[in-house]
Image: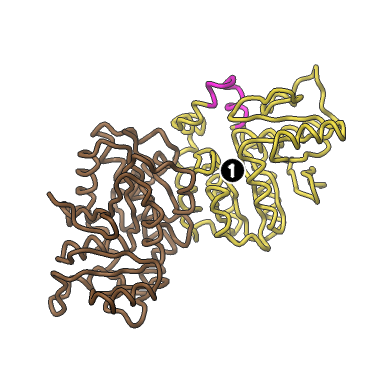
Chain colours: A brown, B yellow
Amino acid sequence: MKLDVCFSPELLPSYDLRGRVAVVVDILRATSTIVTALAAGVTHVFPVAGLDECAALGRATGCLTAAERDGLPAPGFDLGNSPFGFLNPARPVRGRALAISTTNGTQALRRALAAEAVVIGSFLNLAAVVAFARQQQRDVLVVCAGWKGQFCLEDSVFGGALAARLAPLGFDVRSSDAALAALHLWEQAAPDPAAYLLQSAHVRRLNSLEASEDFEFCLNIDAYPDVLPLWQEDRLVLLEK
Amino acid sequence: MKLDVCFSPELLPSYDLRGRVAVVVDILRATSTIVTALAAGVTHVFPVAGLDECAALGRATGCLTAAERDGLPAPGFDLGNSPFGFLNPARPVRGRALAISTTNGTQALRRALAAEAVVIGSFLNLAAVVAFARQQQRDVLVVCAGWKGQFCLEDSVFGGALAARLAPLGFDVRSSDAALAALHLWEQAAPDPAAYLLQSAHVRRLNSLEASEDFEFCLNIDAYPDVLPLWQEDRLVLLEK
């Protein structure tokens, strides 16, 4: 099996997704938030592209709605894109469904649906992604949400972290230049991922928009080692163990 | 001024080229070969996308023709895509024009033409690119030709090498994640660029197609420190000093 990394959804047309596991990643913050939501008891997640669609789904089904644009919570929705929104004991989310719209993450997911299996990756559930890849025994493609179509450091570095975990399990993580580069970036980041990622101007910009607690939270490697959001029909559900 | 790196022509739509200097890079081997051709006395270069167009230009104008597909010389043309084709004393090229078609490089160039100035970069003429950027005092975008639309290591590492040279001249080389990553990859590669790049499966594949002399040649940093191919109207010419 082979691990490859696609640095932006705009590059997906040059990859063959058929027969592969796609791991969609938007570390800051869509996929970290979706993992946290399912870990907190949300029953399933509808990722939607537009704000209107998200609001309409909320009205039609009574589900929770979460939306952000350009890093800030969008007005008129139950929640923004902060994982902490799902950890507030005063507003429990257990048993509720969720519709979520985000700038980059949702669109990466939609474009990856040609894959054999589509799962959601983040540092929080890295171990769950590793376990799934091991069980599937298929080629794996990390689909980075990126930043407005461009390469972003935190998603790419996640690709390298996954490569580092899959290599000892027999995955070829060095046959594509993108996987090789991601692995090299992760090797630089691994001793202190937060310090490494704070070199990024766009990570620092996000930190200035909201409390930097979100950033630190999203880097908790293996905080939810059993939470694997899996695409089924029209939604993300927790993989049954 | 800012330096940014675009890892694939497929990502160009998300960059604003206006007012910028675009440095088109296809280290193995299109842009290294174009630099070598102009250094060897070729008067100007027509980069063309298709083999038919290349052959037709040769018939119509009597210029030299060079073409490769998938790393091998295309049949029926004067030259392939090896820089050594332009260094053969038995077949001098001085005073001739050249039409060249390549898999990735030509297409990257064509897509970059919205920039204020478009130049050709390679390790061979790195110093010339640095001098031009310094003189222009504009934002610089490295446009990597990539490999069939995907990220490739050697073009990206060149972006990092250019960043390392431009940073001390007052260019901001850390405000985009792509430039930052390219710089980090270059820092890993710099002690021994050849050994670093030979980790790449596609670089090794290219080496197996032709003599590895091409690869070694293309890594001669500053071999042609004064050769700057500049786009003018419909062709690449040597920048007048």
Residue B20 occupies quadrant: bottom right
Residue bounds of the magenta highlight:
B206-218
Tell me if A30 is positioned left or right of B151 in this view.
left
Helix, strand or loop at disc 1?
A: loop
Pick whichever, B101 or B3, lies toward us: B101
Q: Amino acid at mark 1?
A: Ala
Q: Residue at x 44, y 54 (%)?
A: A9
* Image position, residue A84 (x, y; %): 22, 71
* Image position, residue B19 (x, y; %): 68, 63
Residue A153 occupies quadrant: bottom left
In terms of secondary structure, what is the magenta stretch mainly? helix
Number of residues whose C-alpha sits closer than 10 Å to that of mark 1, classed few (under 14), some (14–19) or many (20 or more): many
Q: Residue at x 49, y 44 (%)?
A: A14
Tell me if B209 is positioned left or right of A167 in this view.
right
Tell me if B188 is positioned left or right of A55 in this view.
right
Q: Is residue A217 above or below residue B159?
A: below
Q: Residue at x 69, y 57 (%)?
A: B114
Residue A223 occupies quadrant: bottom left
Tell me if A205 is positioned left or right of A78 in this view.
right
The residue tagged 1 is: B145
Pick whichever, B169 or A180, lies toward us: A180
Q: Residue at x 27, y 38 (%)?
A: A166
Q: Chain of mark 1?
A: B
Magenta region includes residue B217: yes
Pick whichever, B160 or B64, lies toward us: B64
Question: Furthest-top residue in view?
Answer: B90
* Image position, residue B235 (x, y; %): 79, 45
Q: Is residue A108 above or below residue B123?
A: below
